[in-house]
């Protein structure tokens, strides 16, 4: 009886060790994906900020020229400073981004499922 319990204990320890290994490998994959997403987000944020800064500088220069010429009216100033509305391309790009994220998620989940070890039975270990 004691040997039977000891064998079950060893089997459970091996099973736990294998599950921990699978968990570590899965965590590494998620960490890589998370890091890639974070780097991408930082890059996109930087590009957007640079584009906004460039546009703001051009708008300020145009407003200065119009003010020097005496052509700057409140209506023109409002048109130059109001935010632009979303375009067709931004909607398409947003949808493509979500499709890409969905495909990447499916691929990662498929890889994770294929890497998980099957339950180890005592008959397999003896062979």
Image (cartoon, helix red, strand yellow):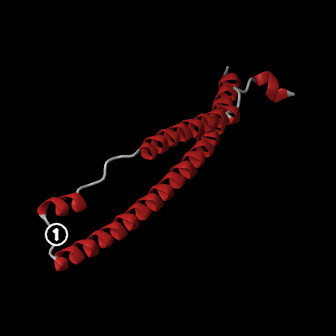
Which of the image's four quarters has the N terminus?
A: top right
Q: Quadrant of the C terminus?
A: top right
Identity of the residue drawn at 22% across and 72% down: 63
Q: Which residue is located at x 24 percent, y 62 percent?
A: 80
Q: Please, what secondary structure does the residue beneath circle 1 have?
A: loop
Instruction: Give the x, y percent position of residue 39.
Output: 50, 59
Q: In the drawing, does residue 45 fall left or right of residue 15? A: left
Residue at x 45%, y 55% (from the top left corner): 41
Q: Quadrant of residue 120?
A: top right
Residue at horizontal 84 percent and vertical 27 percent from the top: 126
Tell whether 108 sits left or right of 75: right
Q: Residue furthest right?
A: 127
Q: Position of residue 85 (x, y in %)?
A: 31, 48
From the top left corner, tell me how far across and down residue 23 is, in percent.
59, 40
Callout 1 environment at 10 Å: few (<14), some (14 to 19), or many (20+)? some
- In the image, 92: left or right of 79? right
Is 123 in front, or is 91? 91
Percent position of residue 115, x then y:
69, 36
Q: Report the residue marked by disc 1.
A: 72
Looking at the rendering, which quadrant does residue 116 occupy?
Answer: top right
Does residue 20 appear left or right of residue 7 in this picture? left
Q: Nearer the viewer, residue 88 or 110?
A: 88
The tally of labels here is: 1
Q: Quadrant of residue 22?
A: top right
The answer to whether 67 is drawn above or below residue 84 in the figure is: below
Nearest to the observer: residue 111 or residue 6 = 111
């Amino acid at each position: 009886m004691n040997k039977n319990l000891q064998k079950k204990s060893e089997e459970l320890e091996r099973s736990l060790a294998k599950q921990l290994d699978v968990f570590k490998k899965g965590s590494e994959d998620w960490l890589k994906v998370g890091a890639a997403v974070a780097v991408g987000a930082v890059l996109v944020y930087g590009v957007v900020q640079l584009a906004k800064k460039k546009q703001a500088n051009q708008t300020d220069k145009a407003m200065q020229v119009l003010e020097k010429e005496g052509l700057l009216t409140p209506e023109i100033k409002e048109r130059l400073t109001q935010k632009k509305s979303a375009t067709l391309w931004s909607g398409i790009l947003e949808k493509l981004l979500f499709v890409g994220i969905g495909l990447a998620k499916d691929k990662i989940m498929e890889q994770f499922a294929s890497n998980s070890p099957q339950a180890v039975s005592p008959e397999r270990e003896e062979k």
